[in-house]
Image: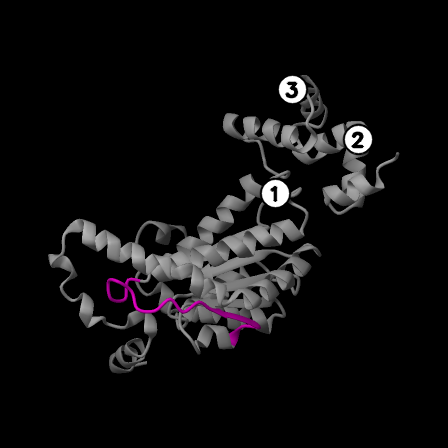
């Protein structure tokens, strides 16, 4: 693609549109700029809401594959890639996901998290190599993330994953995007032109973060990683999380502190197991067996516990 072609393509994107009415924004008082920016951000949830049926369909498809042992893989460049890596990195402490169960790929590799890696986003071949290193299977799901919906790395990732039989989702912020067209599940959250022309770390980035929150969180709910709205698969890796684990068991069971500590000790700090010990009156090994037989779903394990 020539430089002229690329300029023409960018000019046609909603996320790149210039807003003449904001040309004097740098002359405004700081409070006025903040009000403008806050007003712009207020429209993002509505744009996400218009895509909820598509988001829900993608989540159900991802959850079904992950229930068979598949992985959730995000692939993007720049801000979009960083948001994917962020979401993936927060799943282990929040939901006790296995290492590599949720993966964030960013064009240019880990170094691109903190600095620009020139040309990385323009390479669909780089995306294919990054995915091949994961040895994708048909049980895996790949979510390409790109504000423009044209980033070669994200589009290339989705095209390659789909050719390998993996589930594919394309998340962009422009209508009729190449990314959505390449994926089985296209999600286009059109938030409109940015306050600062082309700065898609703003509204587009916020929209992508909201959708990624939904994709991972609701998928984990479907996989039994929560009990009601409690994070019963939280991994207690520090003092704060150990305190949170205790509180979650307390909220779920109403048990006394001494009983909770005993149950957590007996189950090696596993919140879900400790709740089952207290609510079903079983020992630690029995709780572990019931949860294994129930696919990790606490409600199902409670239903099958001996009376």
Q: Which residues are magenta?
A: 182-199
Examine the rendered structure and indicate whether residue 208 appears above or below residue 160: above
Q: Residue furthest left?
A: 27
Earlier sequence position, callout 2 versus callout 1 = 1
Identify the residue shown where x is 54% and y is 67%.
Answer: 169
Q: Secondary structure at mark 2?
A: helix
Q: Where the N terminus falls, by quadrant? A: bottom left
User: Residue drawn 50% across and 28% down?
Assistant: 240
Circle nearer the N terminus (3, 2): 3
Q: Where is residue 140 shown, x and y percent of the image?
A: 62, 61
Disc assigned to residue 257: 3
For residue 278, the mark is: none
Depth check, front residue: 70 or 226: 226
The residue carrying pointer 2 sits among few (fewer than 14), some (14 to 19) or many (20 or more) residues within 10 Å by Cα, namely few
Q: Magenta segment: does it hold 131? A: no
Seen in the picture, residue 296 relative to 61 is either above or below; the reply is above
Q: Is residue 78 visible?
A: no
Residue 133 seen in this snapshot: yes
SS for tag 1?
loop
Q: Secondary structure at mark 3?
A: helix
Nearer to us of marks 3 and 2 is: 3
Q: Residues under labels 2 and 1: Cα distance? A: 25 Å
Quadrant hosting residue 233:
top right
Which mark is nearer the camera, 2 or 1?
A: 1
Residue 285: assigned label = 2
SS assignment for the magenta stretch, majority:
loop
Q: CA distance from mark 3 to mark 1?
A: 21 Å
Q: In the displayed structure, does residue 63 sit left or right of residue 5?
A: right
């Amino acid at each position: 693609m020539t430089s002229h072609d690329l300029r023409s393509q960018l000019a046609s994107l909603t996320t790149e549109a210039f807003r003449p009415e904001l040309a004097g924004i740098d002359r405004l008082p700081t409070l006025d700029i903040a009000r403008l920016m806050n007003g712009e951000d207020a429209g993002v949830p509505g744009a996400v809401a218009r895509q909820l049926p598509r988001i829900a369909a993608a989540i159900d498809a991802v959850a079904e594959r992950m229930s068979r042992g598949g992985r959730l893989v995000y692939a993007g460049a720049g801000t979009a890639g960083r948001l994917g890596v962020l979401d993936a990195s927060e799943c282990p402490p929040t939901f006790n996901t296995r290492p590599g169960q949720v993966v964030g790929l960013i064009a240019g590799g880990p170094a691109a998290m903190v600095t620009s890696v020139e040309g990385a986003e323009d390479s669909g071949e780089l995306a294919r190599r990054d995915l091949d290193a994961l040895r994708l299977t048909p049980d895996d799901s790949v979510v390409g993330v790109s504000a423009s919906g044209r980033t070669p790395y994200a589009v290339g990732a989705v095209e390659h994953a789909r050719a390998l039989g993996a589930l594919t989702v394309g998340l962009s912020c422009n209508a009729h995007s190449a990314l959505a067209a390449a994926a089985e599940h296209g999600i286009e959250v059109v938030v409109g032109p940015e306050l600062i022309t082309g700065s898609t770390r703003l509204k587009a980035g916020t929209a992508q973060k909201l959708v990624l929150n939904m994709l991972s969180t609701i998928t984990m709910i479907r996989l039994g990683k929560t009990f009601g709205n409690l994070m019963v698969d939280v991994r207690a890796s520090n003092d704060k999380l150990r305190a949170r684990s205790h509180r979650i068991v307390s909220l779920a069971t109403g048990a006394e502190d001494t009983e909770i500590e005993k149950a957590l000790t007996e189950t090696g700090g596993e919140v879900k197991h400790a709740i089952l010990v207290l609510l079903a009156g079983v020992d630690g090994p029995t709780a572990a067996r019931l949860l294994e037989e129930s696919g990790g779903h606490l409600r199902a394990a409670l239903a099958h516990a001996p009376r």
